[in-house]
Amino acid sequence: MPTDPSAPVAVVTGASSGIGAATARALAGAGYRVVLGARRADRLEAVAADCGGTPLTLDVTDQGSVDAFVADVVRHHGRCDLLVNNAGGAKGADAVADADLDDWRWMYETNVLGTVRMTKALLPMLVESGDGQVITIGSTAAREAYQGGAGYNAAKFGVAALSRVLRLELLGQPVRVSEVDPGLVETEFSLVRFDGDRERADAVYAGLTPLTADDVAETVRWIATRPAHVNIDQVLMMPRDQAAAKLVHRREA
């Protein structure tokens, strides 16, 4: 893993598991010094040990936590060249008429405002780097509304909008802005969405071959390692067995 103090520094949020953990490993393999942020310190440290990264506790819904995290990034590395906004998630699948506003509030705080907090806090260092990048992990839910997805759709449509506006705002600045929107990825995502209901979570992926966290991480790594003049604005990636949010092919057991 990179030990060169001149190597670029990547910050990955939500890095204790799933796409975030896989992305931290992929970027370390590509030569980045990786700073991993997440709430679950024990799992975060295990991932950091795998990739030689710096584990720092982070709650993107808490401005004080974000401020302390960024101060630690400065203290440890003094720079940031790449921010991967991965922290996020879904809760519930209620219709609008039955919306649990606490779930909606959590999704907005985590997905939208968490992305804003991290981007705002690290943007000065990204500009100063001379070749900064912001890569935000969105979702097909940002592109297509579907029944049972109202709260998550609203949050991810918001994330997509802020990413695309940021791209416009930074035109002429040395910062690239990219959005990666995956479809079905088998991680803890559905387990969190369905409040730990393993049977319901497993049913989401039954009979098909979903994407893996490593598939998404490899896409992030590829975007991050393009030449400085190349901006990959948006990537939509789905498993072969998925053609739309609710249109999947399932094979019989």
Image: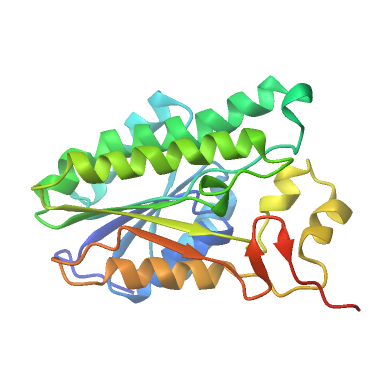
The N terminus sits in image quarter: bottom left
Q: Residue at x 71, y 75 (%)?
A: 209
Q: Residue most toward the right?
A: 253
Picture quadrant of residue 103: top right
207 vs 112, left or right, is right
88 vs 123, left or right, is right
Q: Residue at x 31, y 75 (%)?
A: 30
Up-down: is 55 above or below 39? below
Give x and y (percent) for residue 150. Answer: 65, 35
Give x and y (percent) for residue 44. Answer: 52, 53
Q: 242 or 92: which is nearer to us?
A: 242
Give x and y (percent) for residue 242. Answer: 66, 68
Q: 2 or 206: which is nearer to us?
A: 206
Q: Residue at x 23, y 72 (%)?
A: 226
Q: Is residue 58 among the parts visible in the rendering?
A: no
Tell how many labels: 0
Q: 223 or 39: which is nearer to us?
A: 223
Give x and y (percent) for residue 138. Answer: 48, 50
31 vs 253, left or right, is left
The C terminus sits in image quarter: bottom right
Q: Is residue 238 among the parts visible in the rendering?
A: yes
